[in-house]
Amino acid sequence: MVIRSVAFHHFGCKVNFSEGSALSRKFKGKGFKIVDFHERADCYVISTCIVTAAAEKKCRAAIRQVHKKNPDAFIAVIGCYSELRPETLSGMEGVSMILGTSDKFLLLEKLSALGVQMPDSGTDSPEPDDIGHYHGGIGNSPKSGSSDFVAAWSSDDRTRSFLKIQDGCDYFCSYCTIPLARGRSRSDTIDGVLDHARKIGATGIREMVLTGVNIGDFGRHQNENLLQLIRRLDDIGPVSRIRISSIEPDLLSDEIIEFIAASRHFMPHFHIPLQSGSDRILKQMRRKYDKALYAGRVGRIRTLLPHACIAADLITGFPGETEEDHQETITFLKDIDISYIHVFTYSARPDTWAVGFSDPVSPGVKTLRSRELHRLSEEKKRKFYRTNAGRQARVLFESSNTGGRMDGFTENYIKVSQIFDPAWINQIREIELSELDEKEIIFNL
């Protein structure tokens, strides 16, 4: 078997994205030609997600799509769906290899063991610690054999890199399969993160996003913590900008908020999962906070960083969620000063506690509640943008050219659009946020 060209595609979280990018670099370093997923390739690598039934459906559709495009292609299906539902994937036509959350990092070695002919080694050799950098032995989940930390970071974007600093989760929320698929919480070391951050900075990338499955749990098993890490990163300043991805409200301490407010490199941008504005439902979800704690975190951020972007995740239609619970959530969201909401419709996941809960919410009611929450999110976002109108902001512009225009983001993650100018790519420009486009919800230059 000869494989010359490889196409990668990922579903789901930014952890998947960072891992897929690292795998892509590893293949490129061995001389493989990396092509777009929509092109014809000898090998397709699909990194899967299992958070919702819709995510699983998209993964299966992608497999069918590439098999139709090239029936002779080698199709490797890797990641969380592969970890928990290999029997489903093995029955699909065209699937050549299925690797779970740990084995996926050995994809190249497993191809070699099958006798796949490798191209001549290219000149773009990967950094030695791009992937396969293990720290280990923190225990296993019931299904996943993943107990080691494998570092990864993305390099697909000239402007932004996602740096994986943590993996797995010990929370076992009643609706979530992630601890089953990715194993228990484990982290890179502070020194390991700093090493990767310097490598990212050396590429010319201007912005870095720290990502993980439960990022606030960073370092707990090796007597380190997230606050120590971000202090060190701020000191070395490997890139101009650093963002923290989604962080649980119970792990977002006042000390972290206060540090970011005074930081030189960390952006005023917070993504804090809420999931419900009903304390009763939060208990059913096995979340580790109540809405009073959540409101306190938002209030503390607004006191120190009035223009910060604060995004929330929310699940609607959880089993047993009454109309009163839904309206309590709506009221709570209206009362707190967040910027927008990521709305997810509850999807029953096998092997979770919630799958056996009584009183499921009907699909029609879920749809109505989701629409109401999406409308509220748009209202919140427009209000957030309006409060920033007239301010001076520093915008980092990206490389995409869409219809002759290019986009960039402010420190607090407001999207800005202007006429495409290649000289502005990966540049930070100070501008006035002057004109709001109500339809697109972006500022125009």
Image (cartoon, helix red, strand yellow):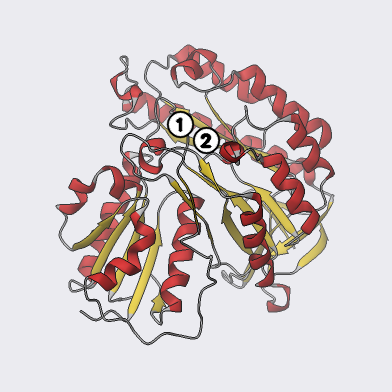
Q: CA distance from mark 2 to mark 1?
A: 6 Å
Q: Quadrant of the N terminus?
A: bottom left
Vertical side of 43 occupied by 10: above or below: above
**Image position, residue 350 (x, y; %):** 28, 32
Tell me if residue 377 comes above or below residue 204 in the rendering: above
In the image: residue 134, left or right of residue 203: left
Residue type for callout 1: Ser
- Looking at the image, residue 270 lies above or below residue 4: above
Instruction: Indicate the position of residue 391 as horizontal and vertical percent values.
Output: 84, 50
Q: Quadrant of residue 405?
A: bottom right
**Residue that numbered label 2 is attached to:** 374
Q: In this view of the protein, which residue sits in the foreground, 414 or 287? A: 287
Q: Amino acid at mark 2?
A: His
Q: Helix, strand, or loop for circle 1?
A: helix
Number of residues whose C-alpha sits closer than 10 Å to that of mark 1, classed few (under 14), some (14–19) or many (20 or more): many
Mark drawn on residue 370: 1
In front of the other: 252 or 436? 252
x, y percent for residue 188 = 57, 50
Report x, y in % for residue 152.
Answer: 52, 59
Q: Quadrant of residue 7?
A: bottom left
